[in-house]
Amino acid sequence: MRGADMKLLPASLLLATCVLSSGPLRAQQPPDAPPLTEPAPLPPAIDPLAPPPRAAPPPVEGEEREAPMSEGRRIVVAWNTGFQWGISPGIIIVDGEASFALGLRFGYGVDTGNLILVPGMRLAGFFSDPAVYLGMPVMKLVLPIDRFAPFLEAGAGVGHVSSTDAVSAKTGVAVLGGGGFMVHFSMKLGLGVEANYQAITGTGFKGFGIGPILALAF
């Protein structure tokens, strides 16, 4: 028994040494075979282990995409926003008689999306008999429809009727209401028509005015 044990012990040690030093088993390749490479990863659409693609964020409630502004509307907005001023000659009819009228207006326009608001100041002189002068803050509302721009205007301020041989000079509250339209052909040219009704309380002055509008930019 003791002799058999002495023979088995070296064999067991040799086996253990071979197992520990051999490392992982590898397949033998022919000498001229190309080296093994790692397989290419599958595309995400085919690979079952790939994470799912990120979904697009849901639209925010109440958020609307703005439609692109047309060229005509851009021209109308350019004419009617920011600081502006203009001279408006015309004709006013008082008691059935036509007289020359000249107006000067200052304003600052703001585009709110659907309407353009133009608060400002209006000065006017009517060279009738007697002569009439007005000065008042006004509000103008412009509705841009491509190149076509209808508008409404209203205001209240101070009016003065000069004296004549028959009547003395009087001053009262002046009111104005009117409207018209403009057609803006380009950034340099626009044509339109304006009509309004004006009166001065306590003076008996009531007049209807109408005149062309010529808009030029240099």
Image (spheres, rainbow, N blue to C red):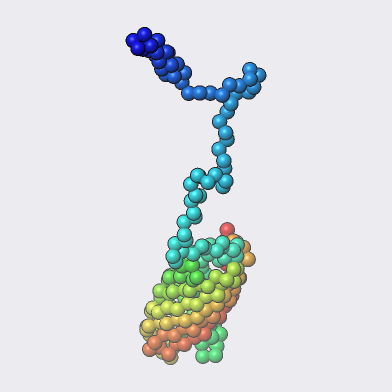
Q: Is residue 106 left or right of residue 96?
A: left
Relative horizontal placement of residue 169, taking residue 73 as reference (left or right): left
Q: Is the residue 142 above or below the residue 8 in the image?
A: below
- Name which residue lies at 52% across and 63% down: 66
Residue 54 drawn at (x, y percent) = 48, 51
Disc tally is 0
Residue at image point 57% right, 46% down: 46
Q: Nearer the viewer, residue 185 or 43?
A: 43
Residue positioned 56% across, 31% down in the render: 38
**Residue 127 in view:** no
Q: Quadrant of residue 166?
A: bottom left
> Where does residue 77 sit, x and y in percent of width and height?
53, 64
- Quarter that holds the C terminus: bottom right
- Residue 30 seen in the figure: yes
87 versus 5 height, above or below = below
Q: Is 192 rendered above or below residue 174?
A: above
Of 189 and 134, the residue lying toward us: 189
x and y, in percent, of residue 133 in the image: 44, 78
Q: Residue at x 54, y 44 (%)?
A: 47
Can you say which quadrant of the picture contains the N terminus? top left
Q: Which residue extends farthest right?
A: 32
Residue 98 screen position, x and y as percent: 56, 85
For this orientation, the residue located farthest to the front is 1
In terms of depth relative to the viewer, which is nearer, 132 or 179? Answer: 179
Q: Quadrant of residue 107?
A: bottom left
